[in-house]
Image (cartoon, rainbow, N blue to C red):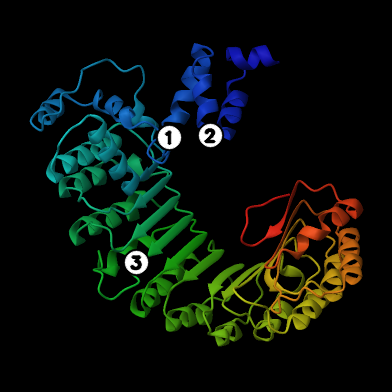
Amino acid sequence: MATKIFTGDMPELMENILNNLSNEIYSIYSCTFVNRHLCKMSIPILWQDPFSFKRRNPSFISQYFSLLSEDENLGLKNFGIDIEISNPLFEYARFLKVLSLSNLEYKVKQWTDLKHLELDNSSKIHIINLLIKLFAESGATLHKLDLFFNYYEINLEIFYSLEQHEIFFSQLQNLYLNTTSRLNTECTAILLRTLAKNATKINYLQLEGPYSKNEPQLFHIGPLIYMIRSQEQLKQVSLNGLDFTQIYRIIKALESQKNTLQEVIIDYCKYDAKSELLKNYKILETLHIEVFNRPEMLKMINHKVSNLEVSDEEIDVSTMIHILEKSGTFLQRLKLDSVENILNENLLIKALKSFCPNIRYLDISGIEFSKQLIALIGTLQKLQVLKLWFYDDDDDDDDDDDELTKLVTRFSKVLPLTLQYLVLKDNTSWLDSYVDIFLKHCKVPLKKLSIGDVYDEDRY
C-alpha cells in the first residue's frame, strides 16, 4: 500500500494526504525531494498561498517574473530591475488560490529590500500590478480574496483585465472587502461588477467599514448590493464598522439569500443597524452579536437559533431567557462572552436544564463555579466542547478548601463521556491547587485539556 502511494499508483489518496498537510509548509516542502511524482503533487500546494507565509523568503517572487513576457521584463529593466530569463519547471502563477492584497504589497516590499533596490512608489506599484495581471492571465482560480490595500493603488487597466478573465474569480468562496482600502471608486465599481458576474459561489463575505466618519469610503454601495444579490450560496456574512445607511441596504440585499444564509456576525456597528437586522431576519440559525450595553437588542430576537453568541461587558441572562426557551432542543452551540461576570446566572442554568439538552458546544466567560453549574453539566449528555472562565469578583482567599475539593471532585465525575475538549480558566489562579484532584477523578477520554488562569498560556 505505502509503495503504491509514493510511486503514484493512488494519486487521489496521496493528494488528500498532502492537502491535509497544507498548513505544514516544511513537511510539504520536504516532499518535493522524495521523487518526481511527489514533487509534481507538492508544488501546486506550496504555491496556493505563498504571500501569507510570514517566514517565507520573498525571493520566490523572482520565479513569477520568469513567466513574464519579454516586453514586460523590458519594462522592469526601465526601473532598474534585471530579471534573469529562465525556463521555469512549473507555471507557478496558475497555482494561486489565496490572494491578499496587503500581503502581496508586503512581500513585494520585502523582495525589493532583499534585492537592494531603491524604488519609488510608482515602481513598486508597477511590480504589484504586473503580478496581479500575471495571476489573472495564467489561468489561476482564486478561492479566497482579501481586498485591503495599505499604501499603493492598482491601475485601472488591471481591473479591466480582471473583468476579461472570467475564470479568475469563478471559484471564489471567501471575500473580504475593506471600505477604506486604497482603491478608487471607479476601480471598485468595476471589480464588484466583475465579481457579480463571475463570482457567484461566495460562501463567506466580510465587509469592514472605516470605524470613523473621518475615513473615506471607497465605493458607492450600489455595486456592492448588486454583487450580494448575484450570489447563489452565501452562508456567512460579517459586518464590521458600518453605518445605518450602509447596513440597511445590505440587509435588504441579503433578503435574496434567505435560502442559504445561516450566520450573520455584527461587530462595531451602530445600534440602529443591529436592530434592523434583528427585526428583519427570522430564519438565521446562527447569530453572533456584540451587545455593548444594549441588552434590549436581545429582546428583539423572537425566533429559534442553533448557534447563539453574545458579547458584552456584563451579560444579563434575563434578557435572553426567551431565546433559550424558543430555541429549546434546536440550540446546539452557546457562547456568552462577558468581560466581567454573568448576571442572573441561576436563570441561565435553570433555562438550559429545562429547555436545551442538546447543546454540544458551551463557552461561558464570567460564571461562578457552583453546585448548580456542575449539576447542569451533568445533564448535557451530548456535550463535546466545554469552555468555562470562572469569575471571582471578591478575590477571596478564605474559600473553604474542603468545599472546593468536593466541587472539583463532583465536577470531574459528572462530565459526559461525549466530551472531547475541556478548557477551564479563572482570574485568581485557584484552579492550580485542584488540578491533581481533577485528574484523579476524571474518567472522560479527553482529546484536549487546558487549565490555567486567564492571563497565562495553557499549562495543562
Give left or right: position of 68 versus 311. left
Res 417 seen here: no
Q: Residue at x 37, y 51 (%)?
A: 146
Pointer 1 with pointer 2, Cβ within 8 A = yes
- The structure residue drawn at horizontal position 71% and vertical position 82%, both measured from the top left corner, is 321
Residue at the image point whose x is 42% and y is 46% from the top: 144
Disc 3 or disc 1, which is closer to the eye?
Answer: 1
Q: Is residue 187 above or below residue 259?
A: above
Amino acid found under the numbered disc labelled 3:
Ile
Indicate left or right for 135 with 439 as reference.
left
Query: How many neighbours does mark 1 have within 10 angstroms: few (below 14), some (14-19), or many (20 or more)?
Result: many
Where is residue 162 drawn, in percent x and y? 26, 44
Q: Residues within 10 Å of mark 3 (few under 14, many from 20)?
A: some
**Residue corresponding to mark 3:** 225
Name the element at disc 3: helix
Name the residue that disc number 2 marks: 22
Question: What's under tag 2, amino acid-wise?
Answer: Ser
What amino acid is at disc 1? Gln
Judge depth for marks 3 and 2 and give the one in front.
Answer: 2
